[in-house]
Each structure stands twice: as C-alpha cells, then as structure tokens.
Image (tube, rainbow, N blue to C red):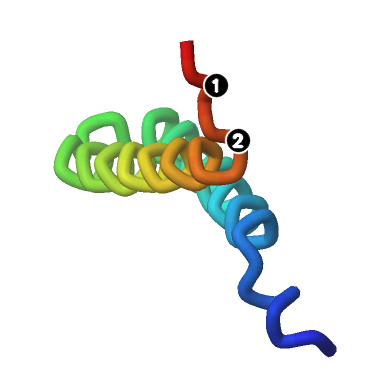
Amino acid sequence: MDNDNLHSLPRHLIELRMAHADLNSLIDQATTLHPEDELVLRRLKKRRLLLRDQIARIEAELDPPEPA
C-alpha cells in the first residue's frame, strides 16, 4: 500500500469526521443514561470541540478561501 495515501490529509479528515460522529453518539448516550455525570459530559464535549477545530483546519488547508 502507498505510504502517502495512508497519511494523506483527505484520509485524515475522514478519520477525524468519524471520530467526531462517534463522540456525538457517546455524548447522546451519556446524556440519556447518565445525565448527572456532568464531568464526563464536559470532557466528551471538549474532545468533540477539539476534533471540530482540527476538521476545520484541514478543510481550510484542502480548500483555502479565495482572495477577495
């Protein structure tokens, strides 16, 4: 397998989006099953936000905005 393909930005973006979706599911489950555990929810939401920031950075790098 091509080593460049394994570490390409589009592939990394897909992996980050999958991890973000997984965290969304975990947050939904934690909210339903353990709404009293605010610390866990805050940590999960913080990780989700960090992933979202990474996704936004890679998207901007792959498709930079056009100059005005």
Front-most of residues 15 and 28 = 15
When the figure is inspected, residue 18 is found, relative to residue 5, above or below; the finding is above
What element does badge 2 sit on? loop
Q: In this view, does 51 lie to the left or right of 20?
A: left
- 10 Å crowding of disc 1: few (<14), some (14-19), many (20+): few
- Which mark, residue 63? 2
At x 60%, y 59%, the residue is: 9
The residue labelled by disc 1 is 66
At x 29%, y 30%, the residue is: 35
Rounded to the nearest angstrom, the CA distance separating label 1 from label 2 is 9 Å
Q: Where is residue 13 in the image (x, y as percent from the top left)?
A: 60, 52
Q: Where is residue 60 in the image (x, y as percent from the top left)?
A: 50, 36
Front-most of residues 62 and 28 = 62
In the rendered structure, which amino acid carries the disc numbered 2? Asp
At x 30%, y 38%, the residue is: 45
In the rendered structure, which amino acid carries the disc numbered 1? Glu
Q: Position of residue 67 (x, y in %)?
A: 48, 19
At x 47%, y 10%, the residue is: 68
Q: Is residue 17 left or right of residue 41?
A: right
Do the residues bearing badges 1 and 2 touch, measured as CB atoms within 8 Å?
no
When the figure is inspected, residue 45 is found, relative to residue 40, above or below; the finding is above
